[in-house]
Amino acid sequence: MSQPIIEVRQLAKKFGTFEAVKDVSFTVNKGDVFGFLGPNGAGKSTTIRCMLSLITPNAGTVKLFGKTYTEDRIGILSRIGSIIEKPDFYKYLSARKNLEIFARISGANVSKKEIEEMLEFVGLGGRGGDKIGGFSHGMKQRLGIAQTLLHKPDLIILDEPTTGLDPQGIIEIRNLILRLKNEQNKTIVLSSHQLSEIELIANRMVIINKGRSIVEGSVQELMNAQELVLTLEVDQLELTKTLIQNNFANAQILSIKENVLELTLEKQQVATLNQDLVRAGVSVAALEPKRRLEDFFMKIVNE
Amino acid sequence: MLLKNTYNEFVKILAKPRSYLGIGALTLLIGVILFAMKADGSSFISFVTQSFEQTLSFNGNILNGNLIAFIILQMLIIHIPLLIALVTGDLISGEAAMGTIRMLATKPISRTQIVLSKFIAGAVYTLIITVWMGFLALIVAKWIFGSGDLIVLNSDGLVILQEADIFWRYAMAFLVAFLSLLTVSSLSITLSAFADNSIGPIVSTMAIIILFSIIGSLDVSVFDHIKPFLFTTHMASWRSFFNDPVPMARIYESIVVLVAHNVVLIALAIFRFNKKDITA
């Protein structure tokens, strides 16, 4: 049975009259790369801040490693490495000095050699002596990841780690996270507003919107939902409609615009529909499947 | 963990250019005073002593290092709080402005320890400023102007202190001056716990000092009840060591008020920082 590392239940947080988080619940298990997905302003950062004791929630519970912060704040934090929004460092200090500062209060004995190794690991081997003031955003992100890993935490929480990075930087950070997963078997929570990013890295995820958790589960299951939304462009609209209604009882026509239909259909029936249409003499100009989750997420984002 | 984070705070203070700005400004200010006194100190002394010349005759080296140190202390005790607040007012709010407060607060160290380590570092910085001021005011001034008896003009009249009777008074005066400046440091760190930028706490600290000083200097009965509780009232108590006899009861009272201020301010900062939602 999976061992829960994070258990968030009915979390709520208000800032004045603004309800940033209304009802968020999810569970992260040991070894998960857990995607925390939602559009901008959904309440992701507030939830993560509650998970890291930066913010005190108004209601609900946050348990990490089976304990609440009231029970063992120091013990919990000593097992977590995190980057919230963007990694900020002391600009007037070098990368190495910054890591030394955070290592000193990480609760572990981190040697100078380990700091150098960590700089190498994130690709900043030759830049340890340089001041942060001259670092690019991507370099700061990589140093941020070095900072989270210094004390060998069991859980890594990364809040929007690729925000503001160029495509090359995004790939570098993504590969770094995959290395952590594959080589060190860390439990990783990764927040993002991009489904594609979560899809590439995470094995489980939760979607939150307007302060509420909407759906939680395995990324593969959610992405490969049996029911698809199809966009179908044909030359004979009425014949197509009749054929769908007669042959596919589970199909549901969502919209019709000129010669384009949007309908829901089970994944294994898509090929049959195409064959039936061709056999009936309907010319199919386009048959484009869209995943339910992607559609669902885009609807959330556009709301 | 408290010691480790206090060490971190020293590393940060030592690396910040603004920390040296305070020491540099202090050195410059004292340098200007020493230069002015060397260039035209005798006319300054004549101006002060002329009202006593009909009843007293002044012999020996009046314009000596002891007198210069007294003048420097008198002049700078108003300005040094700004130099202190410039560094200490930034200790918590500067972390919020930079965003590093998030990193600090997610480390396995209690928020109380984070605040305490900043107070300790602030106290050490204040001590360094006070010792540097003492070194420049007393040691350098004595080296340039020589030593001698100290003539002090206070509200009771002219006090003449023998050379051999002066050093302990300066040592105690600097200790009390340190306590006064420590209160300024504590005030700015506490204000810093309420802010997310550095300018607010620094300006607020100075505004409070100016406001309290004005209240203290106004001869209005409505303020008489609060004056003894204002820390600014006790910031000049170092001067009492240059009275003869030294009014120890009044000095003890000032020490109690200043220590109480520090305790209350530290407690307030700890309470605030522990309750604070870190959204920066």
Image (cartoon, coloured by chain):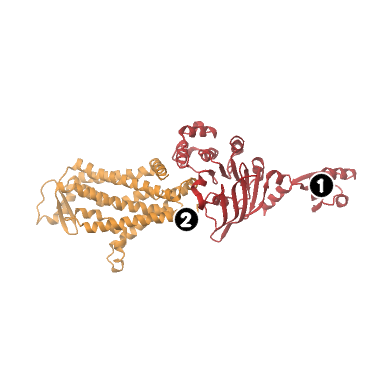
Chain colours: A red, B orange
Q: Nearer the viewer, residue A40 or B9?
A: B9
Q: Say few, some or many: other residues with alpha carbon within 10 Å of mark 1 (under 14 / 14 to 19 / 20 or more).
A: many
The image shows residue B51, relative to residue A85, as above or below, that is below
Q: Is residue A119 above or below residue B12?
A: above
Q: Is residue B272 left or right of residue A121?
A: left
- When the figure is inspected, residue A241 is found, relative to residue A170, above or below; the finding is below
Amino acid type of the residue tagged 1 in the rendering: Glu
* Along the viewing direction, whichever of B175 and A275 lies nearer the viewer: B175
Task: Please tell me if label 2 and label 1 are on a single chain.
Answer: no
Point out which mark residue A279 bears: none
Residue visible at 85% across and 44% down?
A272
Say what secondary structure mark 2 lies in.
Answer: helix
Chain ID at mark 1: A
Farthest-out residue, top: A126
Q: Which residue is mark 1?
A: A233
In the image, A240: left or right of B81? right
Front: mark 2 or 1: 2
Task: Say whether residue A169 is visible.
Answer: no
The percent coordinates of residue A195 (x first, y second) are 66, 45
Q: Quadrant of the C terminus of chain A?
A: bottom right
Residue B71 drawn at (x, y percent):
22, 50
For the question of whether residue A288 can be seen, the reply is yes
- Outermost residue toward the right? A280
Whole-number angstrom distance, CA of label 2 to CA of label 1: 59 Å
- Identity, as a three-letter code, of the amino acid under mark 2: Lys
Residue A271: horizontal and vertical position, in percent? 83, 42
Towards the viewer: A119 or B141: A119
- Front-most of residues B130 and A181: A181
Q: Which residue is mark 2?
A: B275
| Chain letter for the residue marked with disc 2 in the picture | B
| Helix, strand or loop status at disc 1 | strand
The N terminus of chain A lies in quadrant: top right
